[in-house]
Image (tube, rainbow, N blue to C red):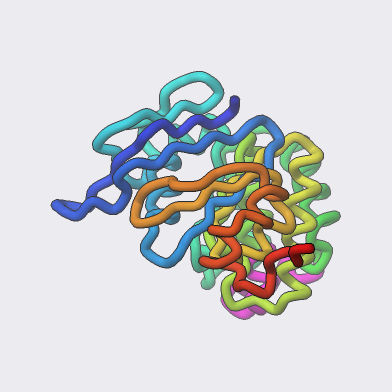
Amino acid sequence: MLLEVDSIQVCYGRMVAVSDVSLSVPEGGFVAMLGANGAGKSTTLRAISGLVPISLGAIRFAGASVAGLPAHTIARRGIAHVPEGRGVLAGLTVQENLQAGALRNPDPKHIAELRNKVFTYFPVLQSRLGQLAGLLSGGEQQMLAIARALLKSPRLLMIDEMSLGLAPQVVDQLMQVLVELTRQGVAVLCVEQNTRLALKYANHGYVLVTGRSTIEGPCATLRSDDRIVKAYLGRSAAPAKT
């Protein structure tokens, strides 16, 4: 298993943001983390990437513990985190944002190969290299955020609320890129409030409720789980009974 999160707890001062979350992501897997606002999804990603410490539990990546390591060390081990809000460097050009993503890569040939692959996923970025990132559309900024993360050559790509504020056709395009990445061996862990969308594209899902992982299973199963249908998909999504 590439990523293993075992019963972690995360606190902000005296407030417990995550009380008991467990999940795993296999090599090349596409896993969705679902739940309402405030369920602890973003905090879980931040804990995995080392941006917040865990109080209890364990986080292992490629068989080794990463809990307590600095964020930059975890990133170098192969975890790339695209935060909610995209996090592009608005005052820099697209080219400079991509260069920032490749900053720790000492091999120019490898960087060129990664850039070419990124441009096959997001050809619009190649035509925007000299444009300030802050002037891109929301969809283009999300493409840039993902592209910058891919230039780190990650084994695991974590994305927080990728669909937020984007047109459905753009979101579908981005999701198809994530599926293609998993075919290339990159594992994906996405936090997504659009449950219907996540269950359409991901292979496996975890549902968080008030800081706890409560339901998990293959997405094909979760789509017909009565608890998921009633809470997140609406009764109209339930399969007809005969």
In this rendering, the answer to whether 183 lies above or below 170 is: above
Q: Toward the viewer: 4 or 72?
A: 4
The quarter of the displayed image where residue 240 is located: bottom right
Extent of the magenta region: 127-143
The quarter of the displayed image where residue 210 is located: bottom left
Q: Toward the viewer: 117 or 196?
A: 196
In this rendering, the answer to whether 222 lies above or below 163 is: above
Q: Residue at x 52, y 72 (%)?
A: 91
| Magenta run includes residue 55 | no
Q: Residue at x 63, y 66 (%)?
A: 142
Q: So how many labels did they put on this image?
A: 0
Locate residue 200 relative to residue 22 in the image: left or right: right
Residue 89 percent location from the top left of the image:
52, 65
Residue 94 visible (yes or no): yes
Q: Residue at x 40, y 55 (%)?
A: 209
Residue 88 visible (yes or no): no
